[in-house]
Amino acid sequence: MYILVLNAGSSSHKLGLYTIGNRLPAEPPAPIWEAQLNWHPQTNTVEIAIESGNQTQTDCRPITERKDSLSSVIETLWTGPTAVLSHAGQIDVVGHRVVHGGTDYPHSTWVTPAVKADIDRLSAWAPLHNPINLEGITLIEQILDNVPQVAVFDTAFHSQMPAVAATYPGPYRWVESGIRRYGFHGISHQYCAHRAAQILQRPLSSLRLVVCHLGNGGSLTAIRQGRSVDTTMGFTPLDGLMMGTRSGSVDPGILLHLMRQGHSAQEIDHTLNQESGLKGISGLSNDLRDIRQAMTDGNPRAGLAYNLYLYRLKSCLGSLIVTLSGLDVLVFTAGIGENSPDIRQAVCENLAFLGLQIDLVHNRQVSADEDIATPASTIRVLVIHTQEDWAIARDCWQLLSDQHTIEATKP
Ligand code: ADP
């Protein structure tokens, strides 16, 4: 079965082709073909990188319609030096990452006109993401005709959170109108929880986990019996942790104060999403590596940004551990979680009182998907390479396999 995954974002589209046989492989496989398109409106160009086997193809072209760019990249699946298929008809299914599925989509689903209408309706709550995700679905319809498509939602894993975790203590009409905590990064959190159980060879249902997804955006999720029971992002991906350019949780009174001073919703949106977090406090960069370097060079604002990032991370983590009444597994994933031993060490030092202990040398030399806790540690600490595209491909495989089974058993 050939499965194409499209992760469509506002400034870049990532594609991956996976091949899966009759059984899911034990270890997550690499895609057999990968492509990335980065749009640069400032220079009116689109940068394209395609990789398959040991072939790499890069190109920078003037921006045309998104459809033309995407279509020419998809065609390299069966034409030219990076071809891995003999024709378009070999693609069995296309899976899409869709950011917001509300509470109606606890699982991945086939794309139908009704599902598309729901993704469109939910654009009001995810204006930067859902319209682009929907555009990706429509473009694939045009490029690959009748190929079946699957929507995999970033909110799905959190859609069954208990009411106490999902509700904001505003007026009850908020609850009735859908103003609640949805949570995001669900594909990554769910993937990491399953992968952690697999690495530890223990049933997921027996574990209390917190997954720390720390990338440019960041969120933590508390998981019990394989379910998300609380997460730090909320109604939007702005809530919770301090992030690269996002503030995370702030007193809503600050927003009222800014509005009374005459700032528009658009300005406040820009401030909270683009001018805050590591970048806002340091005045330098949203990249933790730059902050760390500047801090070492003695820049006090970089020092404050780094320490604030850590402080917020530790306090959110503490809250989730109490929610779980303890912790069996702590997982670090995404750009910072996978690559910053300093952050992992600093977080783990504060958990020593629970009997958590990491091997400091292993922490600095860890490869993906390893346990860095010492044998005596009461809590396992895993560094997991998150593989959201593989998780999407796996869901597509599952839906298609279930459909084949249903068809085979029809009288
Ligand atoms: P996104 O949320 O955009 O998917 P990623 O998960 O790719 O982001 O994470 C990107 C971030 O990871 C960068 O902004 C940078 O702060 C961080 N990062 C990457 N490598 C390192 C490293 N070696 N040390 C510290 N931080 C790193």
Image (tube, helix red, strand yellow):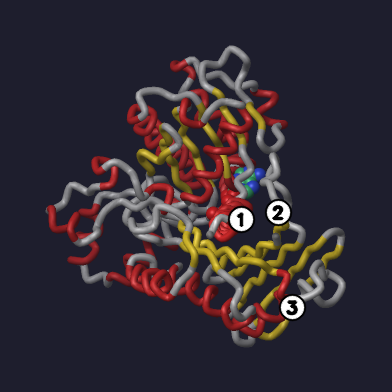
3 or 1: tag closer to the N-terminus: 3
Q: Position of residue 185 (x, y in %)?
A: 47, 51
Q: Where is residue 66 in the image (x, y as percent from the top left)?
A: 60, 81
Q: Where is residue 29 in the image (x, y as percent from the top left)?
A: 72, 48
Q: Do the residues labelled 3 and 2 touch (CB within 8 Å)?
A: no
Say whether residue 290 is visible: no
For image coordinates 70% across by 50% down, the residue present is: 22
3 or 2: tag closer to the N-terminus: 2
Q: Is mark 3 on a helix, strand or loop?
A: helix
**Counting other residues with Cα less than 10 Å from the Cα at mark 3, is it few (<14), some (14-19), or many (20 or more)?**
some
Q: What residue type is labelled 3?
A: Glu
Residue at the extreme front: 411
Instruction: Say which quadrant the N terminus sits in.
Output: bottom right
For image coordinates 41% across by 36% down, the residue present is: 222
Q: Is residue 297 above or below residue 395?
A: above
**Counting other residues with Cα less than 10 Å from the Cα at mark 2, is it few (<14), some (14-19), or many (20 or more)?**
some
Of residue 259 and residue 190, the one placed in the foreground of this image is 190
2 or 1: tag closer to the N-terminus: 2
